[in-house]
Structure formats: structure tokens, C-alpha cells
Image (cartoon, helix red, strand yellow):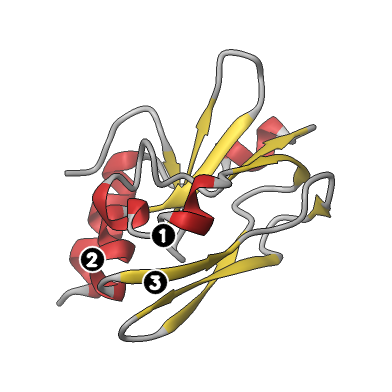
Amino acid sequence: MIPRGLRYTETHEWIRENDDGSYTVGITAYAAEQLGDVVYVELPERDREVSQGDEVGSVESIKAVSDIYAPVGGRVSDVNDALEEHPELVNQSPYEKGWFFTLEDVDADEVESLLKPKAYEAFLAESEE
């Protein structure tokens, strides 16, 4: 199930605009499923300036370590501190409680350049062939 109202990357990050104009970022359920049980999440520092595509952290599971990339550029305004104690939230609730960080000062054109839900769904279907 690919949630509507989000944008996606080919590296399986999602981004959602919040009511206050900031953007929340996480990894997709597909990515979490591929990783297996997440045991550790390294998040970016607050106030860090990032560019689209920058490596900003990592997710460690029982299977592998995977990098987290910034889907768009901006300033990291918040991180999900709950993941320090409960990295399993990434598997249990990737679109709600398992989010990674929020960005401010985002370029709306970069958000527009990301995959819409149907395009991400098609991308997944192609990569599984």
C-alpha cells in the first residue's frame, strides 16, 4: 500500500508537507520490509543544511546497513528522538511514528520533481521484475 499525499524517491525515502510548511522524511514500508528488523537508526544533526541527494544518516537492520538520503535540500529542523530507544518503529509504523527528520527552507520545485504515488508504485513493479 503506497500512501497518497506523499512524494517518493528511487532510494525509497518519502516526504510529506506538514501544515506549518515543514516537510517530514522517512523510508517507505517497502524499504523497511527489505531491511528486515531495524536495530539502529543514525539521524542527521538538527540545523544541518542538506542538499538533495546528500547522505544524511543510516539505518541498520539484522540484514544490512542502508544509507538515508535527503529527498530534497533544506535545513534539518527536527529529528525523531524516539528512534534512539525504539528503532523498531521504522518497521511498525514507517509513515507515522517511524519518521526520521523534518526539513525547513525546502525548494518546492525539488519536491515537485519527486515521484508521485502511482509513479513510485510503477517503479517498484519494474524493479521486482
Badge count: 3
Looking at the image, residue 8 lies above or below residue 17: below
Q: CA distance from mark 2 to mark 3?
A: 13 Å
Residue placed most toward the observer, 16 or 118? 16
Q: Earlier in the sequence, mark 2 or mark 3?
A: 2
**Which SS class for mark 3?**
strand
Amino acid type of the residue tagged 1 in the rendering: Pro
- Seen at 41% across and 55% down, the residue is 86
> Which residue is label 1 attached to?
87
Q: Are marks 2 and 3 in contact (CB under 8 Å)?
A: no
* Residue 84 percent coordinates (x, y): 53, 57
* Residue 107 percent coordinates (x, y): 74, 35
* Residue 52 in which image quadrant: bottom right
Q: CA distance from mark 2 to mark 1?
A: 14 Å
> Which residue is label 3 attached to?
39
Q: Are marks 3 and 1 in contact (CB under 8 Å)?
A: yes
Amino acid type of the residue tagged 3 in the rendering: Val
Residue placed most toward the observer, 128 or 60? 60
> Which residue is label 2 attached to?
33
